[in-house]
Image (tube, grey):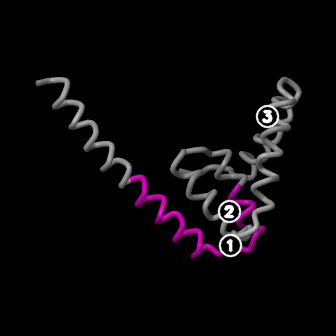
Amino acid sequence: MSNNWPETLNNLGKGGAKLAKEIPDVITAFGNLNAAVDQGKVLDAKTRELISMAVAVTTRCDGCISAHAAAAHKAGASKEELAEALGVAIALNAGAAFVYSTRALEAFDQLGG
């Protein structure tokens, strides 16, 4: 399991530029959304990026991982802080599987008998 994350980030930028030519209004709106989040008044940039990394992992988004890993590093996040945030993501995914397992069992019971 070895990815070239700088290449992933570079390719994301190139792909994003191409997409912006096709749907400029959507990409501008997406950029404005990110800019608004970056102007947060309570959470600092490092905390926002650690949250972003945890979300990127739970949504399985390689582009998000590459972008937010770079941003987290730039914001001063330590490897230890990132590892702790990723631990929360792991716990959440396991928790989500637990919750949805109870729903699946309930659906099976309701629909099968």
Name the side, left or right, on which 84 lies relative to 103: right
* 3 in relation to 24, above or below: below
Using the image as rendered, state which of residue 9 and residue 57 is in the foreground.
57
> x%, y% of residue 9?
75, 48
Q: For the residues marked 2 and 1, what is the alpha-carbon distance in whole angstroms?
A: 8 Å
Residue found at the far front of this picture: 41
Question: In the figure, residue 90 lies in which quadrant?
Answer: bottom left
> x%, y% of residue 82?
59, 69
* 46 in relation to 58, above or below: below
Q: Nearer the viewer, mark 2 or mark 3?
A: 2
Given the image, on which type of amino acid does mark 1 rest? Ala
Helix, strand or loop at mark 1: loop
Q: What residue is drawn where x is 40% and y is 60%?
A: 91
Name the side, left or right, on which 102 lies relative to 30: left
Helix, strand or loop at mark 3: helix
Label drawn at residue 77: 1
Quadrant position of the C terminus in the picture: top left
Question: In the figure, residue 107 lies in which quadrant?
Answer: top left
Q: Nearer the viewer, mark 3 or mark 1?
A: 1
Check contact, mark 2 vs mark 3: CB within 8 A. no
Q: Which residue is mark 2?
A: 49
- Crowd tier of the residue under label 1, counting other residues whose Cα lies within 10 Å: few below 14, some 14–19, many 20 or above: some
Q: Which residues are magenta?
A: 68-93
Q: Earlier in the sequence, mark 2 or mark 1?
A: 2
Q: Which residue is mark 3?
A: 15
Q: What residue is drawn where x is 77% and y is 50%?
A: 34
